[in-house]
Image (cartoon, rainbow, N blue to C red):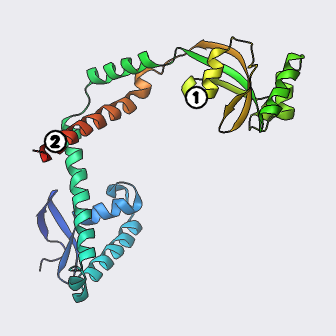
Amino acid sequence: MFAATALMLSGSLWAETVATVNGAEISSDVFNIYLESRIQKPASAATADERATILDEIKDIYLLTTQPRAKELGQDPRTKAQIELQTRGILAQAVAGDFLASNAASDAEIKTAYEEQIALAPPLEFKARHILVETQSQAQELVKELEGGADFAELAKEKSTGPSGPNGGDLGWFGPSQMVAPFSQAVGSLEDGAFTKAPVQTQFGWHVILREDSRESTPPTLESVRDVVKQRIEQEKLQKYLQELRATLDK
């Protein structure tokens, strides 16, 4: 048995044995990983009180798993399966992490993916109001009132059941993808300043929509979405790698 201050070869080259429980050594590597998972910050940022509390916790884990009964329970098929699955899961994450570290998205790949996404972006954004009611007949009555000269915003305040009702049905600026398809299609078919003559049905109810204005959409800058684009590219690379590995199973 090593003393509490002994050193042993480990994943960090040399790790201190921080405690020994029933002959089982708790290395600083194991302790630090458990510590970080519990306090959700780097081990180096842990306070003395946090380290003491977490050390007691992990010693209890070792205490329970070094009991004679633990060895017997470790042979239970369900427990063995859970241990196997957890081990495989950790290894899978490690292999995936290693793959991504070796196949990080390059600046050129990020720029290309960004430009492709921008090219697919909707050309227009819309500013609209709507009045939401429960039935088609209610919506048709609203259309008649609007055709008779009623003020759209005031009618929305009075009749709309949607959360934007108190604000006169104002939805602000939005892109087509931000609304459900029937709503976006209706807004896109209108001219600025026009409202829908036929009520529009969505899963929320029946809408009368006023398209107040439109403008060319302003795409986000590359720097503002770089991390998101990078992550997407790398996930696509990982999925391609997995597909290649799956293909080998069929041979």
Q: Which residue is mark 2?
A: 247
Q: Earlier in the sequence, mark 1 or mark 2?
A: 1
Q: Quadrant of the N terminus?
A: bottom left
Q: Which residue is mark 1?
A: 181
- Residue 46, image x and y in percent? 37, 60
Against 81, residue 156 (above or below) is above
- Residue 185, image x and y in percent? 60, 22
Position of 65 with respect to 196 (left or right) is left
Q: Quadrant of the C terminus?
A: top left
- Residue 166, image x and y in percent? 81, 35
Whole-number angstrom distance, CA of label 1 to CA of label 2: 37 Å
Disc 1 residue type (three-letter): Ala
Report the residue that reaches farthest toward the bottom: 68
Position of 90 with respect to 221 (left or right) is left
- Residue 151, image x and y in percent? 86, 21
Residue found at x 39% / y 72%: 53
Q: Is residue 211 visible?
A: yes
**Which picture quadrant has residue 179?**
top right
Q: Is residue 151 visible?
A: no
**Which picture quadrant has residue 103?**
top left
Q: Which mark is residue 128?
A: none
Marks 1 and 2 close (CB-CB < 8 Å) = no
Out of 141 and 105, give the one closest to the viewer. Answer: 141
Position of 201 with respect to 89 (left or right) is right
